Image (spheres, rainbow, N blue to C red):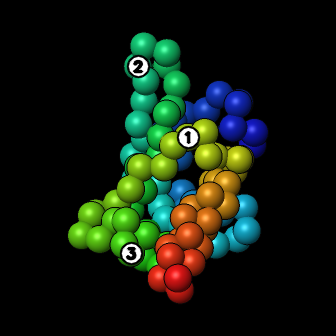
Amino acid sequence: MDRSEPQEITSLVGREVYSNNGVFVGEVEDLRLDVEQEIVTGLAMTELNRDLFEDRAAGARGVIVPYRWVRSVGDIVLVNDIVERMRGREDEEEAA
């Protein structure tokens, strides 16, 4: 399903989120909404892949990913690989 097609927003809750490179990111627990514009602005995720978020989300229950990162919504949600790049940047910093 293309992300621009209307659907019940509650149908996103519980879906697994993967990067476009196939790396598990987390699970959608809730949505951030702009009520005035009637659009989804972010995905609140839990059950995170701690390898991706361990330093940025240490001690946090979850993270909110901007909805603009979403590439497609179907049985799973695909997001841009920016999440993996964040992790890669941390690895580069540690190596320096």
Q: Are marks 2 and 3 in contact (CB under 8 Å)?
A: no
Position of the N terminus by quadrant: top right
Q: Are marks 2 and 1 in contact (CB under 8 Å)?
A: no
In the rendered image, the residue lying farthest to the front is: 96
Dot 3 alpha-carbon crowd within 10 angstroms: few under 14, some 14 to 19, many 20 or more:
few
Q: Is residue 61 left or right of residue 35?
A: left
Please tell me whether residue 22 is drawn above or below residue 37 in the rendered image.
below
Residue 67 is marked as 1
Task: State whether residue 9 appears in this view.
Answer: yes
Q: Amino acid at mark 1?
A: Tyr
Q: Residue at x 50, y 76 (%)?
A: 93
Q: Are marks 1 and 3 in contact (CB under 8 Å)?
A: no
- Per the image, the residue denoted by label 2 is 35
First in sequence, mark 2 or 1: give its number: 2
Can you give x and y, in whole percent of width and height, for residue 75 in the image?
66, 56
Nearest-to-viewer mark from 1 and 3: 3
First in sequence, mark 2 or 3: give its number: 2
Can you give x and y, in whole percent of width and height, for residue 38 in the image?
49, 19
Q: Amino acid at mark 2?
A: Val
Dot 1 alpha-carbon crowd within 10 angstroms: few under 14, some 14 to 19, many 20 or more:
some
**Considering the numbered disc 2 on the image, is that residue within a helix, a strand or a loop?**
loop
First in sequence, mark 1 or 3: give its number: 3
**Considering the numbered disc 1 on the image, is that residue within a helix, a strand or a loop?**
helix
